[in-house]
Amino acid sequence: MPGTGTNQQVIAMLDELVRLTTLDEESPQSFKVRAYEKAKLGVEAHGEDIGELSAAQLTRIDGIGKSTAAKIREFIDTGTVDKLERLRAEYPPSFAELAKIPGLGPKTLKLVRRELGVEDLDALRSAIADEKLRALKGLGATREAKIAKAIERLGLTGKDRRTPIAEALPLARRLVADLEAVPAATQAAYCGSLRRMAETIGDIDITVASDDPPSIMAAVVHHPEATEIVLTGDTKTSFLTSTGLQVDVRVVEPDQFGAAILYFTGSKAHNIALRQRAIDRGWLLNEYGLLDGDDVIASATEEAIYDALGLAYVPPPMREATGEVPAAAVSAAIAAAAGDRTGEAERDPDDRPLPDLVELEHIQGDLHYHTDRSGDGRSPLADMVAVAAAKGWRYLAITDHGEDLAINGSNREQMLEHRERINALQGDYPEMVILWGCELNIGPDGGLDYDDEFRALFDYTVASVHSHFDQDQVDQTRRIVRAIEDPTVNSIGHLTGRYIGRRPGIELDIPTVLDALVANDVALEINGALDRLDAASDVVRRAVDRGVKLVINTDSHHVSELGRMEYGVLTAQRGWTPRELVINTWSQDDFLRWARSRT
Ligand code: DGT
Ligand code: CA
Ligand code: CA
Ligand code: ZN
C-alpha cells in the first residue's frame, strides 16, 4: 500500500463496493450493500490508522463484519480485492457511471444493457434518440424523457461530462498524498479547475516534481485507483478511475515546478493574460519558466514568477481572468511605493488592488453546527464541542434543526433541555463561547419554526430552505426575503439548497435578496460542504460588491466534517471576499456584539 492514507483508500474501496454491489444485487437495500456501507461509516468514524489491524481486530470496529474485515485485510495486503476485481470486470467504469443517472435504477440499467446492448453513455444517448428505451418492458415514453432530462441535468455528455467537486477533490488529495510519498518525488500538487475550486471538474490534473520520472509513472500505473490506463509516456500518464473520471499526472523537473503548476492551474484565460505581460517585457512564459532568451528569470515557484511580472501573488481560486491580473498589478505597485508618498498620491482611485482576502487562519468560530439532537446528526454534543474547541474556535453556535423539519427537528422541550446540556458544558471551555442556536426551517411561504417569542430565546440562528424547490422565482424570492426580515434570524444558510450535480437550487432574484440582507443586517452563509458550496462563488462576489456580511460554516453533522471550513474559505476567495466582511473572522467581542444586537 503506497504511502499514507490507508483509511482513506479503504473508504474509497468500500465506496466502490457499495456502488458496484448495488448494481449487481439490483438494490441499495441488499444485505451486502448495507454491510459495506456500515463498514465504511465505521472506518470513517475510527480515528486511528487501521493498516496494522488483523481481520479479527478489524471486526471489533463498529459496523465491520467478518466477511468485510477479510476484504479490508486483503485490500491492505495486496492492493486489491478479488470480489471487487470481478465486479469491475462485469461493470467497467463507462457502464457503471450510468448508475448515477436518477430514474435509471440498477434493474432498468441492466435491462437496457441486455436488450439494447448499451455499454456506455454514448450508446445510451443514441438509444434514447432512436426512441428504443420506451419500447422496453415497464418503461414507456415518459420515463424515457425523464432519463434524457436527467442526463442533461447531470452534464453527463460524453467528452463534456463534468464531475462534481465533492467527488474529485478528496480523490485528488489522496492521489497527491500518495505521490508525494514516493521517494523519487520532491513535490506534488493538483492543478487545473480543481485547484481553482470550480464546482465541477472536467479532469484532474496532477503535477509531480521529480528527477526520476519513470519511478513516478510506475507508481501511477500501479495505483489502486487507476482502474483503466488511457495513456502512459515518459512524463505523462492518464488514467480513468472506477467512476470514469480522468486523471492526468505529469512529471516535471523540480526547479520548474512553479512554472508547471502555474501553467496547469490555468485558467487558460488567466495564463493568456500573464503571457501577454511577459511578451510586453520582451520575455516568454510557458510551462517551463519565465524566460529571457536562454536566461531563466523565474521558474521554481509561482510567487517568483508573479513577482518578476510585476504582480502580487494571485490565489488559485481567483485565476479566472475577471480582473485579478490588473488588480494584482495595482497591489504590486502599492507595495513597491510603500513609504514613497508621491507614488501613492499619483494612483488612479479607479485602479483597485486585490482584496485583503479572507484566509483559513482568520476563522474564529463555526456558526452552523449539528449534534445528534438533529435526526441527521451523527455525533453527540460533548464530542462535537470537544473537536470545535480543539480547532481553537473562540465561539461556536450549536444549530440543531427546528421542529418544522420532520423527523430531524426538535420540539421546544427538547430544545430547552438541549440548552441545559450546552450550558453545563460551557464551564469546561473558558476560551470558547458556546451559543445555543437553531437551524430554522424556511417554510414554503417564508414562515419559520415555533413562534416569535420562542425563536427570540435562541442566542443565534441560521435559517435555511430544505423543501419546496419547485416554486417560481418570484415566490422563492419573496419566501427568502420574508425570512431575512424576521428579527430572530441572524443568517441565511445554504441559500439555494442545491446539491452540485444532483439537484439544482431554488431560483432567486439575487439582487433583491442581497439588498434585503444588507437592509436587515443578516449574514449570508458560505456553506463549506463540498456538495453544496452554497452560496456559490459568483453570488458571493455580487454580495461582496454590495457589502453583504458573510459567514463561512461547515454545517457539520459528525466530528469528521470540520475540514469543510477550508472549502468554504476557498469558495469565499473565489468570490473575492475580504476578511472584514466575514463575521466569523471577527474577535469574540465584536462577533457577540453583532449577534446580540440582532436578536
Ligand atoms: P476542466 O478540466 O475542464 O475542468 O478545466 P481545466 O481548467 O482544468 O482545463 P484542462 O484540464 O483542459 O487544462 C488544465 C490547465 O492547463 C488549464 O487550466 C490551463 C492549461 N492549459 C491547457 N491547455 C492550454 C492552452 O491551450 N493554452 C494555455 N495557455 N493553457 C492551457
Ligand atoms: Ca482539468
Ligand atoms: Ca487535463
Ligand atoms: Zn444544517
Image (tube, rainbow, N blue to C red):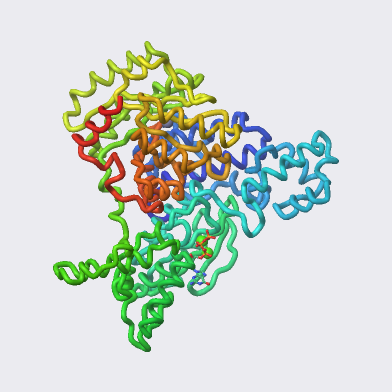
Residue that lies at the very extreme toward the bottom in this rendered image: 293
Please tell me whether residue 399 is drawn above or below residue 112 in the rendered image. Answer: above
Number of marks present in the image shown: 0
Residue 501 falls left or right of residue 377 = right
Query: From the viewer's perspective, is 17 left or right of 581?
Result: right
* Picture quadrant of residue 139: top right
Quadrant including the C terminus: top left
- On screen, 284 above or below 457? below
Percent across and percent down for residue 362 are 25, 46
Query: Quick check: can you spot residue 73?
Result: no
Q: Is residue 252 left or right of residue 303?
A: right
Quarter of the figure with residue 518: top left
Tell me which residue sits at (61%, 55%) in the image.
161
Q: Nearer the viewer, residue 213 or 54?
A: 213
Q: Quadrant of residue 400?
A: top left
Query: Residue at the location (51% across, 45% down)?
Result: 13
| Along the line of sight, the residue nearer the viewer: 80 or 9 | 9
Most extreme residue toward the right is: 135
Q: Nearer the viewer, residue 470 or 209?
A: 470
- Image position, residue 504 (x, y; %): 57, 41
Q: Is residue 150 visible?
A: yes
> Residue 563: horizontal and vertical position, in percent?
36, 43
Percent of width and height locating residue 16: 56, 44
Q: Residue at x 36, y 74 (%)?
A: 256
Residue occupying image coordinates x 33% and y 73%:
305
